[in-house]
Amino acid sequence: MLTVLIRAFRVPELRRKLLFTLGLLALFRFGQTLPAPGVDVVAVQRCLGTARGGLVDMMQLLSGGAMLKLSVFALGAMPYITAGIVMQLLAVVVPRLEALRKQGQNGQARITQYTRYLTVGLAVLNATTVTALARAGNLLPGCATPLLRDQGLLAVAVIVVTMVAGACIVMWLGELITDRGIGNGMSLLMFTQVVAVFPSYMSTIFMVSPFSFGVMLVTGAFLVAGVVYVEQAQRRLPVQYAKRMVGRRMYGGTSTYIPLKVNQAGIVPVIFTSSLLYLPSMAAPLLGDGVGGWLSRVLATGTHPLYLTAYVLLVVGFAYFYVSISFNPVEVADSMRRYGGFVPGIRPGGPTAGYLAYVLSRLTAAGALYLGVLALLPMIAFMILRDPGTQQNFPFGGTSVLIMVGVGLETVKQIEAQLQQRTYEGFLR
């Protein structure tokens, strides 16, 4: 990876794109450390020093430590990412969205605009909830200190508007990175959020137990290597194209393959599951001592059996569901048949679609099991280490590792592709 970056910086155009991307990421991190107007920074720092637990660590991870600090970019990239996932899910059940998805670039532009509107709606809901919890002193467990200097409705409205505007700016920054930088903008912003909280977690673990710190480094290295291996693994289905005459020219007669990854769903199931479980955690303080207290007990440490079961089942379920809507075997088989392609030994049309669905279901089973095991690894580490300070700061969770490895690999692949393109252009000239 370091070699690829060094080669990329030697190409002027790629160097400009990389510096542009790094500049926007630095601006994003600055906005996450800048407190919103009316926030008592001293009280926030005092409460953050004492509040620990599963919900706190989850909020720290998903927002890069910005949400609990009530910063300008407190919501981070999560509203846009969640809106994008919801729009993909709605495209399956809403005929209008399905028709737009098939219209090409114009239809995709309309879906992107709908995603922006949904992002603003989710940002308003999220910002209102966070600000209401901060106003009531329930945002951080174990700390009832008011986090706002002024409890009036006007001051609260200013904070909500600031956070929603920050979410819109983050959405704009992500689209700028995608258009003029390197890699997927929102994925890189999410990557930045996750990486930003790692130093504080690791330093806290080292201060609590140097032995646990060493064990965690070794375990994390093996875990990252295993994730890289599985993320790169794929099943290549051979496809043969028959020769055909179009006018006076002969086309076809080539061999290629369809790459089906073991983890075809990527990081979407883990992110969506974390967001889904994050919502009841946020609403627990507003539901009273009965239901709210029960939710707090179940979701407080992240090791409750009911929480673990729900987390794994949701990850596996979303993995199957997302693969089913992102890869349609019938459409792929029809496209192959139109261009004279076929899988050796399989008849075109319906038999090919059935074969693709069969292979995809087996790969998805392995990928969903992999995601479920990866989600359980932090909890297993909790039981082995039996160190409360280490448990509360364990950074190698399934969500964090998948985001870091997945986004890192995708970005490096894009850089390598652009480097190869420049090499070929230079050779042709």
Image (spheres, rainbow, N blue to C red):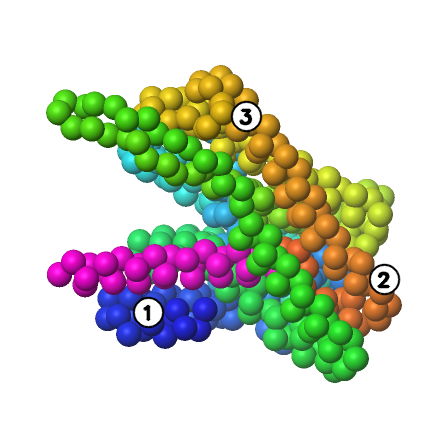
Whichever of callouts 3 and 1 sits on the residue coming sooner in the sequence is: 1
Q: Which residues are magenta?
A: 400-429
Q: Nearer the viewer, mark 3 or mark 1?
A: 3
- The residue indicated by pointer 2 is 383
- The residue indicated by pointer 1 is 8
Question: Whole-percent x and y of residue 283?
Answer: 70, 47
Whichever of callouts 3 and 2 sits on the residue coming sooner in the sequence is: 3
- The residue indicated by pointer 3 is 355
Whichever of callouts 2 and 1 sits on the residue coming sooner in the sequence is: 1
Residue drawn at x 30%, y 60% is 420
Q: Residues within 10 Å of mark 3 (few under 14, many from 20)?
A: some
Q: Residues within 10 Å of mark 2 (few under 14, many from 20)?
A: few
Helix, strand or loop at disc 1? helix
How far is disc 3 from disc 1 in space, using C-alphas?
41 Å
Residue drawn at x 39%, y 69% is 4
Q: Residue furthest top?
A: 350
In magenta segment, residue 34:
no
Question: Whole-percent x and y of residue 198?
Answer: 61, 70
